[in-house]
Each structure stands twice: as C-alpha cells, then as structure tokens.
Amino acid sequence: MPDLTADPFAAAAASASALAQRTGQPRHQIAVVLGSGWAPAADALGAVVAEVPLSELGGFPEPTVAGHVPAARSVSLGGTPVLVFLGRVHRYEGHSAAAVVHGVRTAIAAGCSTVVLTNAAGGIRAGLRPGQPVLISDHLNLTGSSPLAGLPPDCPPDRPVFADMSEVYSRRLRALARASEPTLTEGVYAAMLGPQYETPAEIRMLRAMGADLVGMSTALEAIAARHLGAEVIGISLVTNVAAGLSEQKLDHQDVLSAGRGAAAALGTLLAAILTAILTEVRQS
Ligand code: 8IG
C-alpha cells in the first residue's frame, strides 16, 4: 500500500483497485459523501450492490468511535454505479488533510467524474431554518489547511497545485439541482477547523465575510475534487441557527435530532438530484 503522504494519488489508485475487486464494479460514475444526519438518505439512492468497510481499502484512518464501521457502498441507480461513502473523517479528529480527502481521491481514481458532498451546518443567513437543505454556491476555506499543500512536485502530472477555484461548485450541476427541486436556496459555506462551535463574535465575522452557512467539512474535499477535474455539487442540511443568532446554546444532540427529522426528505432530494445529473449525462 503506497504511503498517503509520499504519494496520495498512488494510494488512491490502490484503494480504487481494492474497491473494484471487493464490489465487483470495475468503475463508478458518481461519488456521494454523506455527512452528519445524511446517513438515512443512503437507502434512497438505489439498490445495494455491495458494502465494503473502509478498513479493507487501505489509506483510510482507523475508526475512532466504537461500534461504528465506516463503509463505502456501491449502489445501482437505474443501472449506473454510484459510490456512496456512509460518513467522513474531519481535520478536527486529528486527521491530515490527505486523510480527509482520501475518499474523494479514491472515488475519482475509481472513475467518478462527479462528486456530491453533503454535510450538516449552522445557518448564518437570516431565514435559514433547521431542517432546510441549502445548495452550496461557494465556500470560504478557513480551516488553515489545504489538501494540495505539500504534494510532491509533478504529483500527479499535469495537475497544477495552484489550482483554479473560480467555480468549485458547478453552475451546471446547481442549475440541474434547482430545476429538480425549485425550492432549494443557495448559500456560501464557511469551513472552520472546529471542533468547537463559534463564538457570537466569530459568527458576526463570518457573516461580514459573506458566509451563509458554517461547518467543519466539505471544503477540503471540494478542493481535492476540483484539483483532479471532477465536477462538484454540495448540499448542507441546516441543523441549527449559528451561535449568538438565537437564544439557544448549541448542543450536538439537538443538531443530531434536527438531522433525524429531515432524513426521509433528504433521501428523496438526493435521489432526485442524482437522477437529474445522470439523465443529463445520458442525453449528452
Ligand atoms: I451541524 O454552528 C453544525 N456544524 N462550525 N458551526 C460549525 N459547525 C457546525 C455547526 C455550527 N452546526
């Protein structure tokens, strides 16, 4: 198994080859990363072809939470192989940026040209309410890290580390998503390192910087996917109003229960968006 730091792309290719072997699917077309609260949506994404624990693919960090086995699921959505990650790891857990984006790099090595990133987030913009899905229009990477920092020269060849980020979240895919779900609004996602939630002063700062949503994931994966030329779409589930914008204190359990309430609708939404994307691919 190639080392994640020495050559993350060789590591991703090795994981993709293990994935093909264990799922029986030589290629996948779309990758979906399910964030907090989104796991129940997995069952709406198509018939399960295979489910593989990430520990069998190499390069993924060992799970830290007992009883929870992170896995990748291969599903067939109307015959198209879709790769679904039933969870992710974060920088705040102590993982490197390379480890955080290993799933996305593996998916792209496995053939995915589209990456769908989901997360749970705090709502900063007035009017965003818990339970509401929001299409990510752009991000502020405030994590202080990048998956492109420290890459060996020419690794991979023909991919500049000074990657263009002028359209991280595809206009084309966002238009397709809005066409299939006209009530979807869009917002700018601020990615923080975490794991603590923000102070009210930090939320005022983020709002002044143009953020509508705040969370602790997604941006690094989106950067890694764009660096490799994949098209990206991101969806946040608002699970709480950001700090200082309501009377309530932020509590992880409240955040989780807001997610549970929205779970069924999220599956329907995600399946509709994937179907719209795939229909477009077939017609073109
Ligand atoms: I869910 O309010 C969720 N994740 N940083 N702030 C940050 N991350 C979050 C929040 C939030 N809510």
Image: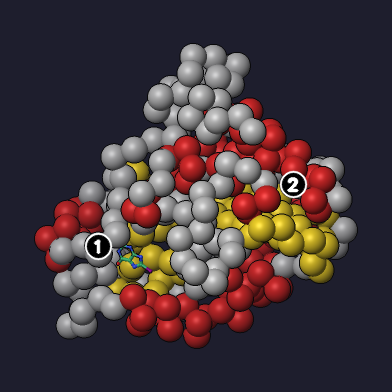
Number of marks in picture: 2
Looking at the image, which is closer to me, 126 or 9?
9
Ligand 1 within 8 Å, label 1 CB? yes
Mark identifier at residue 276: none
Q: Quadrant of residue 154?
A: top right
Q: Quadrant of ligand 1?
A: bottom left
Q: CA distance from mark 1 to mark 2?
A: 34 Å
Quadrant in the picture for the N terminus = top right
Which residue shows up at 61% across the image and 29% down it?
A: 2
Please, what is the three-letter code of the amino acid marked with disc 1? Gln
Vertical side of 142 occupied by 116: above or below: below
Which residue shows up at 47% across the image and 38% down it?
A: 98
Mark 2 residue element: helix
Vertical side of 134 occupied by 250: above or below: below
Crowdedness near tag 2: few (<14), some (14–19) or many (≥20) residues, C-alpha within 10 Å: many
Please, what is the three-letter code of the amino acid marked with disc 2? Leu
Whole-percent x and y of residue 251? Answer: 29, 78
Q: Which residue is mark 2?
A: 19
Whole-percent x and y of residue 192? Answer: 30, 52
Mark 1 residue element: loop
Q: Which residue is mark 1?
A: 196
